[in-house]
Image: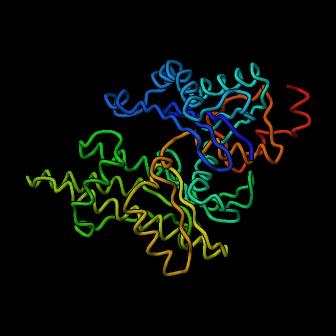
Amino acid sequence: MATVLAIETSCDETAVAIVKNRHVMSSIVSSQIAIHRQYGGVVPEVASRQHVETVNQAIAQSLTDAKLDWSEVDAIAATCAPGLVGALLVGLTAAKTLALVHQKPLIGVHHLEGHIYASYLTDPTLEPPFLCLLVSGGHTSLIYVKECGIYEILGQTRDDAAGEAFDKVARLLNLGYPGGPILDRLAAEGNPKAFPLPEGKVSRPEGGFHRYDSSFSGLKTAVLRLTQTLQQEGQPLPVNDIAASFQATVAKALTKRAIACALDYGLDTIVVGGGVAANSGLRQHLQAAASQHNLRVLFPPMKFCTDNAAMIGCAAAEHFEKGHISPLTLGAQSRLPVSDVMTLYRSSANSHSAN
């Protein structure tokens, strides 16, 4: 397969990687967490400025680490949707410039497709069809992966994404940002059965509940009311137990929906992607439930759960092999359904003539 240099700047990580044959030759990730922590979340303008300051150095370092020069790179890729538009533009503009200067094809990559491909870095033999449970700070979806670029969304959150709920609950408990790793660490010391919390079912107009859709807004509110009640009673907050109960509820809700979806669609593999894929509670619950139904579960390596460019390069390499090339007029988009991935490409023949 092709050797691809990929750039990821959709949010608050400036990442550059070089990928070949689903093998990571180099991966640079410059995180902005320390910068945004003082604000309690990502500030888009601050993120964009930091990308501008960091991206050139990351590109140079990725080539050095991979021991390659530009003649050995086949294509340039960048995340172009969805994400913070200002942040996306930094990486996409850098990629376009490199494509022009070095006369390489440009490949725009959908950020969520990158998270799907993160598990290809775990198992290079992975092939569709399979189900992807994508859980991050901005997205919680069940995606039917039919083939490269062909995806069907079978379930999604109706309100807060799973990662967003982790951050909000951590804020309620004054634990800091980002909330996911902190809650995961505290939950290991707590009792997951200490407090019964609502799973967050989504009602259907005709009665019953959606089997695949999820909702975490009510769960977040339940944690808020629990903490308020305990404080009003003058009791110290059992933070570890609250963290464990919250995490277990999220993990069970996601696991139930993923297992049901895989069985209903006859899929024997569940791939997990996104930042919440690093959560120990989710990993334990899903692996245990899947084994009972003879389903295979693949989690990305921990370093590829959060945003990175290696997953973007892996997806881009496959598109390149299939002749999917993006025009240099490709724009950044804050929103784009993963089912519309193929709108980012045109035939390789037309693209090469245009470029």
| In the displayed structure image, the side of residue 106 where residue 81 appears, left or right | left
98 or 160, which is in the foreground?
98
Q: Residue drawn 70% across and 32% down?
A: 76
The picture quadrant where one finds residue 40 is: top left
Residue 261 screen position, x and y as percent: 59, 70
Above or below — where is 231 with respect to 125? above
Which residue reaches farthest front?
67
Q: Nearer the viewer, residue 191 or 58?
A: 58
Q: Is residue 284 left or right of residue 271?
A: left
Left or right of 305, for residue 234? left
Q: Residue at x 71, y 51 (%)?
A: 339
Instruction: Give the image location of residue 308, x and y in percent.
Output: 53, 40
Location of residue 72 (image quadrant): top right
Q: Position of residue 107 (x, y in %)?
A: 73, 36
Task: Point out residue 227 in the picture as x, y percentages from the top left corner.
Answer: 21, 53
| Residue lying at 31% horizontally and 28% vertically, measured from the top left | 38
